Image (tube, rainbow, N blue to C red):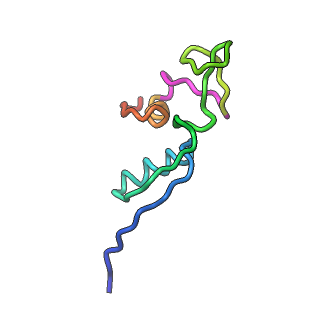
């Protein structure tokens, strides 16, 4: 006998892995809660200017190269905005 099991998933961390998990769960219609300690999403993806402040035209501090205009799908995950991935 099959039962319809409803559950909610906890995702700890709003870095790349957490955001990808959230996107996949959302696509599958599964409820989730994403917990992030910082006041922004993206984990180690961060650009800063020469004063150390967050900046769109600064230098990368993150785990890999990330160019929002080249990687629109990833940019949408990090900023929380939906854009069409090219």
Residue at 35% over, 69% down: 6
Depth order, front residue of 72/17: 17
Instruction: Name the foreground residue: 49 vs 71.
Output: 49
Q: Residue at x 32, y 79 (%)?
A: 3
Q: Main structural element of the magenta stretch: helix, strand or loop?
A: loop
Give percent across and percent down for residue 49: 63, 15
Residue sitting nearer the eye, 10 or 86? 10
Query: Residue 21 vs residue 28: left or right?
Result: right
Magenta-colored stretch includes residue 9: no
- Above or below — where is 23 with respect to 49? below
Q: Position of residue 42 (x, y in %)?
A: 55, 36
Write the residue at 45% across / 61% down: 9
Looking at the rendering, the stretch of residues picked out in magenta corresponds to 63-71
Quarter of the view holding residue 85:
top left
State the image coordinates of residue 46 (x, y, percent, origin top left).
60, 28
Which residue appears farthest toward the bottom when viewing the image? 1
Q: Which quarter of the image is occupied by the C terminus?
A: top left
């Amino acid at each position: 006998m099959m039962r319809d099991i409803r559950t909610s998933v906890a995702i700890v961390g709003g870095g790349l892995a957490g955001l990808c998990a959230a996107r996949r769960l959302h696509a599958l219609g599964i409820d989730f809660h994403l917990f992030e300690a910082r006041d922004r999403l993206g984990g180690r993806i961060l650009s800063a200017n020469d004063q150390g402040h967050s900046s769109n035209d600064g230098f990368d501090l993150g785990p890999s190269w990330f160019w929002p205009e080249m990687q629109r799908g990833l940019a949408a995950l990090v900023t929380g905005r939906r854009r069409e991935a090219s």
